Amino acid sequence: MNYSRQREEVQEQLGFHHDHPSADVIYSELREKDPTISLATVYRNLKLLAQNGVIRRLTFVSGADRFEPNINPHYHFVCDCCGKVFDVPMQAAETLDEAASKYISGKITGHDLVFHGICDGCNDSCEYSA
Amino acid sequence: MNYSRQREEVQEQLGFHHDHPSADVIYSELREKDPTISLATVYRNLKLLAQNGVIRRLTFVSGADRFEPNINPHYHFVCDCCGKVFDVPMQAAETLDEAASKYISGKITGHDLVFHGICDGCNDSCEYSA
DNA sequence: TAAAAAATGATAACAATTATTAATTTATAT
DNA sequence: ATATAAATTAATAATTGTTATCATTTTTTA
């Protein structure tokens, strides 16, 4: 990764935020300071920075949304290699909402817990890197 | 919500799955049984069924992916009204990965914990229903 | 300072999802 | 049972979010 002024701008602009903006928000804001920056450049650098662990992308799995028939509260395991999603039938940790409420100014209705890792099917033969 | 054969098919087809498919997977599978069903119908009914709590949509927030500058492990609070995302600076629950490992056949590398609810800004004036 | 590698801006292409609309199906009230 | 109203459908256009392409410019290397 070579230096680029635009990448630095993207990282700096994201750093101003405490509200987890989307790519187009960063783009709109940057256009005011740098009227020639391209939307593709913003997407490209957000992706690069996230892949290099400099920033973080928040998403459930990349690509399309998933659906499940089981509406009983339960947790999930996502394979970061193949993208498969598995149910985790462990006991829900009721105390988490209570513990979180100390840090949140708002009404908590519940939580989602997603474990990440590599599933048995993928094992160590993984080439994916979303 | 009136009865419809197609909606029943969508719900039944999702019920066969234990791997949390996307809309187009359900569509492809249904086309074999019902060659005239439309992709829009599948999307429409998955959305309706999820809104009515019959099935569940798995996503972080609807719409575009979000980004954050803070790469230190921490949790999040999502307002289901306005979609805003807040950091939750509570202590990470290390024991969760250990507890989950009993139920997962694969290598766990970590977890994401997302609290849901209504933020103070939205309070009870919420009209959103993704 | 010239050559090689990487990044950019502009835009086309692609992917995921929703909106539109005329026709059909389902429910309701005779 | 039957006419009417309401809901749903298939087909497809439109929208949104994101990535790919490519000629040009910038950064690094020699």
Image: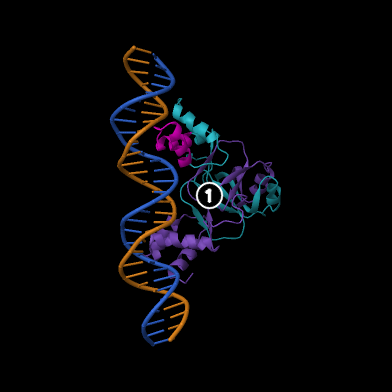
Chain colours: A cyan, B purple, C orange, D blue
Query: Residue drawn 71% across and 48% down?
Result: A99
A92 displayed left or right of A79 = right
Q: Residues within 10 Å of mark 1 (few under 14, many from 20)?
A: some
Picture coordinates of residue A44, whole percent (x, y): 43, 36
Picture coordinates of residue B48, whole percent (x, y): 49, 62
* Magenta: main secondary structure: helix
Residue A102 appears in view: yes
Q: What chain does mark 1 sit on?
A: B
A75 displayed left or right of A99 = left
According to the image, label 1 marks what residue? B61
B121 vs B99, nearest the viewer? B121
Picture coordinates of residue A5, whole percent (x, y): 45, 27
Residue type pointed to by label 1: Val
Residue B33 lies within the magenta run: no
Which residues are the magenta region? Answer: A23-48
Is B34 placed above or below A119 here?
below
The secondary element bearing badge 1 is classed as: loop
Residue A27 lies within the magenta run: yes
Picture coordinates of residue B27, whole percent (x, y): 41, 59
A103 vs C16, nearest the viewer? A103
How many marks the image carries: the answer is 1
Query: Residue drawn 49% across and 64% down?
Result: B11
Residue A128 appears in view: no
B127 vs C27, nearest the viewer? B127
Is B84 placed above or below B21 here?
above
